[in-house]
Image (spheres, rainbow, N blue to C red):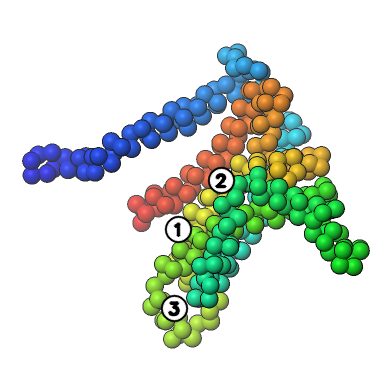
Amino acid sequence: MSPHGKPAGLLKNLSAKIAAIPMVVTALVVFIGFSAWTITYSFTNSRLLPRADWVGLAQYERLWSTRRWVISIENLAVYGSLMLIMSLVLGFLLAVLIDQKIRFEDSFRTIFLYPYALSFIVTGLVWQWLLDAEFGIQAAVRSMGFESFTFDPLYNADLVLYGVLIAGLWHGSGLVMCLMLAGLRGIDEDIWKATKIDGIPTWKTYLFVVIPMMRPVFITTLVLVTSGIIKLYDLIIAQTGGGPGLASEVPAKFVFDAMFVSQNLAQGFAASTMMLVAVIFVIIPWAYLEFGGKKHG
């Protein structure tokens, strides 16, 4: 209580809390309200228009018996695991490089981060051209005399996901680098001096001292990258359109096609609900580690 008998905590930053009301209401209505609406109608047989005819879990049973949906999940698992590991490793290595107080640091940081400023559509179109068999990297190398050189992953069903992965890493590694660099710059200089005095090799310092201290940064980066992986759509549409065949099909594209091409709203709602569940499985552990873990600690 304040000296005047008012709850000080409630009135603290009152103007900021009032200003946040529209955002809170919008979040409740748009995100929670529409999510609840989507989940509810995923249990119906809605086609072109929403219908309240309840069918229980029929849409989910049909979804998981659909070959295209299963393939999209498998593709996302392959792409996601590689993207997650490689973006974290590449971003951390770039951050370590930039953290060495190299010359033109600002220029390098801008160059590495610039791709993230582009939309996924632009990124996909750029790499579609670069990986094109007739006009891209393959054609350029062959023009130098290497006639047997082959590099056309977007036209190979076994390699197309790796072609998309290249574009994804080019687009997202800069953001990971900036997050990691911020974490590295937050490490106390005395820690580096102590490890040097003790004769600990640099790689051991990073592995056993620095990385554990950067745990919050890694967790936040993990959540951001994973969320982007789950909703992967623009890059696929711009680069491959889901082909060749179903080799690069992903859940987000399945949802779009089910709702707007096949005009099967309930099936699209069921698929989008499964994507929401995947996001929740990412967010809840992060929230616990960031907030619940601190309270228990």
Residues 159 and 130: in front is 130
149 with respect to 196 (left or right): right
Q: Give the numbered dot on residue 216.
A: 1
85 with respect to 189 (left or right): right
- Distance from disc 1 to disc 3, alpha carbons, whole Å, reads 20 Å
Work out whether mark 2 precedes mark 1 in sequence or the reverse, and give the earlier one. 1
Which three-letter amino acid code belongs to the residue tagged 3? Answer: Trp
For residue 278, above or below residue 268: below
Q: What element carries label 2?
A: helix
Q: How many marks?
A: 3
- Residue highlighted by disc 3: 192
Instruction: Please name the residue shown 36% across and 56% down the image.
Output: 297
Other residues around mark 3 within 10 Å, as few (<14) / some (14–19) / many (≥20): some
Other residues around mark 2 within 10 Å, as few (<14) / some (14–19) / many (≥20): some
- Distance from disc 2 to disc 1, alpha carbons, whole Å, reads 17 Å
Which three-letter amino acid code belongs to the residue tagged 1? Answer: Pro
- Distance from disc 3 to disc 2, alpha carbons, whole Å, reads 34 Å
